[in-house]
Structures are given as structure tokens and as C-alpha cells.
Image (cartoon, helix red, strand yellow):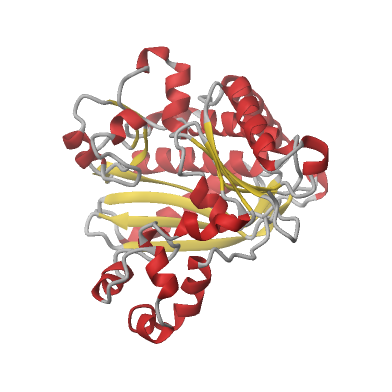
């Protein structure tokens, strides 16, 4: 099935990942609509299982609307540590077939298996074996698209969802693409699609056959880009081990916070999350940013670079606390609707050879972090600093 260049690409997409993990861990959820996300009226749906999707619930939908559409669903808070644990098992399967895989998120990746065919068999055989191993190790299902480029593989993985596999043969690209709504092309959304409808372009096939001059009034200078997609052309390589550029964590509160203690407890919890992810990925951060949004939707950010990079929970927390308290000194009575921290300037952690980011980044602090990480790996999260327990629910 690979094309003349020997390219064979898989797009592996876990089915309703967060909700599926919850159903696997709690068998009493079987057959019920399950919605995972922020539970307050300001919350957003992270994942809805297929029973909930029948009611029109989808990811990124406001939770308040999801409750109206599907009031009988089971609504659950996300458990990020558990999802990362399961994701690690899924990605371990990918490594058994090729080093050329590009993770897009915890539950989704591209794999270039062109050099694996001789060892493991045709692409469809590899795809089915990957699905089988994922199910065997995690109890979850995955859908896989098989094609000779990333764009087609991504579209193909949706065709037989959930728990399916679809192959786009190089000689049948037009047959696959032409009937699709033009919105399936990356970059054509709520603004561009109506412009295309006005000139009679509703499907990918119609766009492919249209004159570029006609399309320009709807697509502007992107005409050639969309014509290439409509022909199924995509030469982007799979990029393994794509380095992280940033790591962040933020929370929107159902009731805006004004209490100093509540804000600091939330900030410590976020520092735990970000620092733990840095350590898991063996990274250090040089710059920390605090993001604050008040109840009038005004958003500010405050950043500070460290003398030396760090992944210490206490180092990140102390720096974030200083930035937050500086803002609070000027806005002491302002309710906070959203609070978050993020880190950038990431680099590999070479261990003890690094200088300390500040006095907290000493051997004692590192030992505490290692103990926390060890317990959280063993028990899928849940161990936190005492002050974090005061976070608003």
C-alpha cells in the first residue's frame, strides 16, 4: 500500500480517550453517557463518550450546555495523571513497530511505518496488530487511518470510528476525498465555508475542479494550498521526538476567587502539575509565566526568568507566588476568574550538574520531588503538598 516513495503513514486515534479510561476503571459506567470535564457552569467538556455524543455533546462544549443536552449523563472530573499513565502504555506499543512516531496529544499520533513493512508485514496488518496490542494492554480501543501521507491518514482514522481501521489506497484518493464536505479540509471553518457555499462549492471534489480565479474570492492567497489538499497532496514528514516548547496548567473557577489562601493553594497545585510533567519528561524550564483573568474577562500575564533552569516544585511555586502577589498588591479586591502558570525555555535535565534555580532547588527539595513522583507513578496521582488540599473545589 505504500506509494512510489515508500511512504506508509498511520494515524492512530484513541476512541473517546478520557471517557474510555473512566469506563475501564469503573465498570458500572458501561452503557451510560459519560462526560469528562470541568464540572462547574464555567467548565468545558474534555471528552464525551459515544452514548453522550448521540445527544449532541462534544469536546470543547460548555459544560452547562452539555448538562442541558444530556442531563442523565455521568459527569466526571478529569484525572490527568491516570490518562498520562495509560497514554504511556499506548505509546510503548508504537515504539515496538517504528521509532518514527509523532505524538499529537496523549491519545493521538502519526506513525511512519515505511521501513517497518519488511519486518512486520503490510500496513493494514501492522495497523490491526497495533490496535490489538493497545486493547490487550489497556483494555481500550483505537481507530487507525492508513494512507501514504498524514492528511489522508488523519481523515481515514475517522471513517470507521469507533474501534475501526480504514485504508486509503494511492489510486483511490479522489474516490475517497471528492464526496466529503469541503469543511473536512484543514483550515476551512466557520468563516471560509459560507464563502465557498456562495460560489457553489460544497464538496472537496467541487473545490478540486473549480477554477483558481473563482476560488480566490473565498480563499484569498491560500487557493493553491487548498487545491493541494483537495488532490490529497501532503508532503509533511512524521517528526519524532518533537521537543516541547512549553508546559502549562490553568483553572477557570466556577466562583471567582478573592481569598489569598485559596489563590496560593491553587497556584501550588498548578506548580506541582507543571513541575511533575517537567520531571517526567526530563526537562528543566528557564522562564515561568503566571496568567490571571479577572471577572471582567481582563487577562494579564507576568513572567520571570530564573538564573538557572529548574523543575523543582517549590522553586516554580515561589516564583509564581511572587508574581501573583505583585499583581495582587495592585488589585487586592479584584476577583480572579482564571489562574494559571506556564513554563518556557525548556531544556534537557542533565541531573546534578545543573546549578540551582534558587535556594529551594537544593538536594533536599530534589529528594522530596523524587518521593512525590515515585508515589504518584505507583498510585496514578493523588499525592500533593498539604497546602494544595485547600484548593477550591
Q: Quadrant of residue 23?
A: top left
Res. 357 visible in picture: no
Q: Residue at x 41, y 38 (%)?
A: 265
The residue lying at 63 percent from left, 22 percent from top is 137
Q: What's the residue at 48%, 51% (across, down)?
A: 341
Q: Nearer the viewer, residue 186 or 21?
A: 186
| Numbered circles on residues, count | 0
Q: Quadrant of residue 251?
A: top left
Left or right of 186? Residue 262 is: left
* Residue 307 spot, x, y in % from top left: 68, 60
| Residue 386 shows in this picture | yes
Identify the residue at image location x=21%, y=31%.
Answer: 70
Residue 135: x %, y % from top left: 58, 24
Horizontal placement of 365 versus 259: left or right? right
User: Between 12 and 117, which is closer to the camera in this rendering?
Assistant: 117
Residue 290 lies left or right of residue 356; in this view the side is: left
Depicted 11 relative to depicted 216: above or below: above
What percent of the width, then of the height, locates residue 323?
46, 57
In the current view of this chain or complex, which residue is farthest to the left? 68
Q: Give the vertical position of 177 relative to 92 (above or below).
A: below
- Residue sticking out furthest to the bottom: 213
Percent position of residue 382, x then y: 50, 24
Quarter containing the C terminus: top left
Tell me: 309 left or right of 292: right
Amino acid at each position: 500500500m505504500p506509494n512510489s516513495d515508500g511512504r506508509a503513514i498511520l494515524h492512530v486515534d484513541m476512541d473517546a480517550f478520557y471517557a474510555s479510561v473512566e469506563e475501564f476503571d469503573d465498570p458500572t459506567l458501561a452503557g451510560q453517557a459519560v462526560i469528562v470535564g470541568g464540572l462547574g457552569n464555567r467548565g468545558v467538556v474534555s471528552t464525551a463518550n459515544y452514548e453522550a455524543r448521540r445527544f449532541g455533546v462534544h469536546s470543547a462544549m460548555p459544560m452547562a450546555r452539555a448538562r442541558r443536552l444530556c442531563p442523565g449523563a455521568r459527569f466526571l472530573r478529569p484525572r490527568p495523571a491516570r490518562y498520562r499513565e495509560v497514554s504511556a502504555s499506548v505509546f510503548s506499543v508504537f515504539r515496538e513497530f517504528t521509532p518514527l512516531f509523532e505524538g499529537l496529544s496523549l491519545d493521538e499520533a502519526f506513525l511512519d511505518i515505511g521501513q517497518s513493512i519488511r519486518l512486520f508485514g503490510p500496513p493494514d496488518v501492522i495497523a490491526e496488530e497495533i490496535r490489538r496490542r493497545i486493547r490487550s494492554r489497556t483494555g481500550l480501543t483505537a481507530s487507525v487511518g492508513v494512507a501514504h501521507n498524514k492528511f489522508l491518514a488523519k481523515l481515514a482514522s475517522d471513517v470507521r470510528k469507533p474501534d475501526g481501521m480504514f485504508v486509503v489506497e494511492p489510486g483511490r484518493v479522489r474516490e475517497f476525498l471528492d464526496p466529503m464536505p469541503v469543511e473536512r479540509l484543514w483550515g476551512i471553518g466557520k468563516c471560509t465555508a459560507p464563502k465557498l457555499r456562495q460560489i457553489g462549492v460544497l464538496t472537496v471534489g467541487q473545490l478540486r475542479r473549480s477554477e483558481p480565479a473563482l476560488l480566490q474570492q473565498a480563499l484569498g492567497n491560500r487557493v493553491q494550498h487548498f487545491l493541494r489538499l483537495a488532490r490529497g497532496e501532503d508532503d509533511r514528514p512524521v517528526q519524532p521526538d518533537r521537543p516541547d516548547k512549553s508546559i502549562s496548567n490553568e483553572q477557570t473557577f466556577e466562583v471567582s476567587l478573592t481569598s489569598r489562601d485559596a489563590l496560593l493553594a491553587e497556584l501550588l497545585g498548578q506548580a506541582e502539575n507543571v513541575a511533575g510533567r517537567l520531571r517526567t519528561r526530563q526537562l528543566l524550564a528557564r522562564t515561568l509565566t503566571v496568567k490571571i483573568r479577572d471577572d471582567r474577562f481582563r487577562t494579564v500575564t507576568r513572567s520571570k526568568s530564573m538564573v538557572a533552569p529548574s523543575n523543582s516544585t517549590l522553586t516554580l511555586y515561589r516564583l509564581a507566588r511572587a508574581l501573583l502577589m505583585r499583581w495582587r498588591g495592585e488589585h487586592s479586591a479584584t476577583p480572579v476568574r482564571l489562574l494559571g502558570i506556564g513554563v518556557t525555555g525548556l531544556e534537557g535535565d542533565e541531573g546534578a550538574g545543573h546549578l540551582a534555580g534558587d535556594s529551594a532547588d537544593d538536594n533536599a527539595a530534589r529528594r522530596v520531588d523524587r518521593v512525590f513522583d515515585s508515589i504518584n507513578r505507583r498510585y496514578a496521582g493523588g499525592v500533593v503538598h498539604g497546602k494544595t488540599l485547600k484548593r477550591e473545589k
